[in-house]
Amino acid sequence: MLEKTSRYTIQYKAFVQSITKNYEIKKSKQIWRYIMKNEIMEIMNDSYSHSPNAKCFYIVTRIAGPGAPSELDEQFKSGCDCESACLNTCPCSNRGYKIQNRTKCIDDKDTTIITECHDNCSCFKAEWQDPNGPTNHTGCINRLLQYGPIKNLEIFETADRGLGLRCKNFIKKNSFICEYAGEVISLHEANRRCDENLAKNRPSYVFVLREYFSCQEIITCVDPSEFGNIGRYINHSCDPNAVVLPVRIESPVPYLGVFSIKDIPANNEIHFDYGKDGLSNTPCKCDALNCRKWLPGNRRS
């Protein structure tokens, strides 16, 4: 069951006064809605920021943009009632993560549906036993994206593709890296922005996620052009080491999570495939053996 929620914890006037002068008041209202909606994400640990010359506002998770689905403001009224560790019988964790070598990771055999536990689950303060060791841990094992990106990510200048993203640490296969956060917009708005970007010869960051359940297609569009997090710096590769997957937490509208699909050595660039539905007229510079020579069309999907 779903119910609409609204939580207010700071004064709007004080917030507007503190907003950066580089943004219009109408934009600050969007960020205000983002803070209100995402009080549930208050435990997220994201201390990253944009590159010095970036003309965008840093957000730690998604915000509602033009044409965002109404379900974005809805929250699952109930969650699991696990009194200890969430096991396979848990309605959330049986579509969540697994523990491997003391690390939470995705199951590469089934990544079609990932659902994290949320505020209305009773497992948040439960202790769980690590299957690979005797240590007791506090907290639910089925929470990952909501805790924020991994540590030691770094924005850097690539040789010929502008800015990119890498990690100073080794990243194991199937590990969570960060959210691809931005404005959640309608498909119509996504097409409009992509067409405008193409006409003005500027890059497009719009990601279009398509999910298929029986005969139903669910489309989620995220644009981090003006509001985004560190995930917006991930470049394309025809031979990627990461993938974007839908992750549902408190809402039927998924977050976009970036996960590794290979072991990524320290200081190696992180990249995912922007899509295979069509090619643009922009040369691809990924240098992969299977390079398609041209970047995907003006949408990441």
Image (cartoon, rainbow, N blue to C red):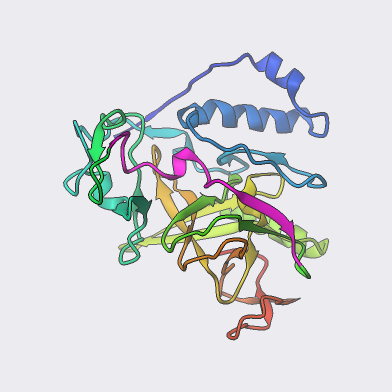
| Left or right of 193, for residue 211 | left
Say above or below: 107 vs 83: below
Image quadrant assignment for residue 140: top left
Q: Position of residue 90 (x, y in %)?
A: 20, 43
Residue 260 against residue 282 in the figure, above or below: above
284 relative position to 39: left or right: right
Tell me if residue 251 is in the magenta stretch.
no
Residue sitting nearer the eye, 93 or 100:
100
Q: Quadrant of the C terminus?
A: bottom right
Residue reaching furthest bottom?
289
Instruction: Please name the residue shown 39% across and 37% down the image.
Output: 250
Q: Residue furthest front?
A: 134
Q: Residue at x 74, y 21 (%)?
A: 18
Answer whether residue 156 is magenta in the image: yes
Coordinates of residue 36 in the picture (x, y in percent): 54, 25
Where's residue 143, x and y in %?
37, 41
Q: Is residue 226 left or right of residue 7?
A: right
Work out whether residue 139 or residue 193 is closer to the camera in this orientation and state it: 139
Q: Quadrant of the N terminus?
A: top left
Residue range in magenta is 136-158
Disc tally is 0
State the residue at coordinates (61%, 76%).
278
Name the one closer to the observer, 193 or 83. Answer: 83
Whether residue 189 is visible to the viewer of this picture, yes or no, is: no
Q: Residue 26, percent across and down? A: 73, 30
Q: Which residue is found at the position 33% from the left and 50% from the top?
A: 102
Q: Is residue 175 visible?
A: yes
